[in-house]
């Protein structure tokens, strides 16, 4: 995994460098061609035109050489990683006699400053890179198929065990809960029965609010009245009263 990460980082770095070199040199190539055609638009002698054309060719070739070198650096990263993986997996390497799978084995770079570089690296082309990747994927898939089938059986059995354990655990939990409820009901004491001879006192009525009648007037301080005179008896006639006839 770490090797693959390093490979991806190296590819990103070299691709960025190659892209930057193209963005830098392509405008220079166009500017050089424009200057050359403007130079030719004015009548000049053959020697002067020949010298200017030779300078244009050297400049454009040097700028293209820088772009090609940066592009081959990207191919170098791919080639190193893919060839090592193919050797590790025991895959046959791409045939070197098949020209479409490989880049040119020799490149002669002549730069603007006069320096020269000969590139003799054996590098896979874009077609060779795609072919090597396909071969590696196929080999890995074939090697992984038996483990894939076994892993499917193992994971399926593990899922069954987990599901069965979950059901058993749920059943045990429910049983324990039912036992707890039953025990709590059996331990509860019923209230004592009411005796028939004991009468329940009536509920107390709420106290009546205090009367708001006005207070009694104080007793008068007048003197007491004189005693009444005895009733006068009728005058006596001297005749005794008649007795009452019995009923």
Image (cartoon, rainbow, N blue to C red):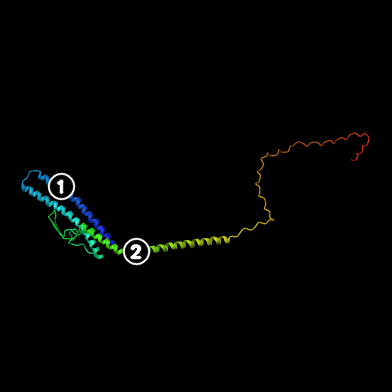
Give the answer, above or below, for where 58 lies relative to 235: below
Which residue is at 31% across, 63% downward?
145
The residue carrying mark 2 is: 149
Instruction: Evaluate whether residue 178 shows in this view.
Output: yes
Tell me if 227 is positioned left or right of 216 in this view: right
Residue 21: % across, % down? 19, 52
In the structure shown, which secondary structural element does the residue marked by tag 2 occupy?
Answer: helix
Q: Which mark is residue 31?
A: 1
Q: Which mark is drawn over residue 134?
A: none
- In this view, the residue in front, 222 or 8, is 8
Instruction: Determine the image quadrant of residue 98.
Output: bottom left
Labels 2 & 1 near each other (Cβ < 8 A): no
- Estimate the x, y position of residue 168 in percent, counting from the top left: 46, 63
Circle nearer the N terminus (2, 1): 1
Q: Residue at x 26, y 61 (%)?
A: 136
- Residue visible at 57% across and 60% down? 185
Quadrant in which the C terminus appears? top right
Q: Residue 160: horizontal and vertical position, in percent?
A: 41, 63
Badge 2: residue crowd in 10 Å (few <14, some 14–19, many ≥20) = few
Report whether 23 appears left or right of 41: right
**The one of 223 and 159 positioned closer to us in this rendering:** 159
Could you say which is closer to the camera, residue 170 or residue 121? 170
Callout 1: 10 Å neighbours few (<14), some, many (20+)?
Answer: few
Residue 15: image x %, image y %?
A: 23, 55
Camera-side mark, 2 or 1: 2
Quadrant assignment for the N terminus: bottom left
Whether residue 74 can be seen here: no
């Amino acid at each position: 995994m770490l090797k693959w990460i390093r490979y991806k980082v190296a590819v990103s770095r070299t691709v960025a460098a190659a892209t930057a070199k193209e963005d830098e040199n392509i405008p220079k190539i166009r500017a050089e061609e424009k200057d050359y055609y403007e130079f030719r638009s004015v009548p000049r002698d053959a020697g002067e035109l020949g010298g200017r054309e030779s300078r244009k060719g050297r400049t454009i070739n040097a700028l293209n050489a820088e772009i090609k070198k940066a592009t081959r650096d990207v191919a170098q990263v791919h080639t190193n990683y893919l060839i090592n993986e193919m050797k590790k997996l025991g895959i046959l390497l791409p045939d070197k006699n098949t020209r479409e799978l490989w880049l040119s084995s020799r490149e002669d770079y002549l730069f603007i400053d006069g320096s020269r570089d000969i590139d003799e690296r054996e590098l896979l082309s874009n077609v060779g890179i795609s072919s090597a990747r396909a071969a590696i994927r196929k080999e890995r898939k074939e090697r992984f198929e038996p483990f894939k089938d076994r892993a499917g059986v193992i994971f399926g059995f593990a899922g069954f065990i987990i599901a069965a354990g979950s059901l058993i655990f749920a059943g045990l939990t429910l049983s324990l809960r039912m036992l707890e409820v039953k025990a709590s009901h059996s331990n509860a004491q019923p209230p004592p029965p009411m005796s028939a001879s004991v009468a329940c006192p009536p509920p107390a009525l709420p106290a009546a609010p205090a009367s708001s009648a006005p207070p009694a007037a104080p007793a008068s301080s007048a003197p007491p009245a004189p005693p009444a005179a005895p009733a006068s008896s009728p005058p006596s006639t001297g005749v005794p009263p008649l007795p009452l006839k019995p009923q």
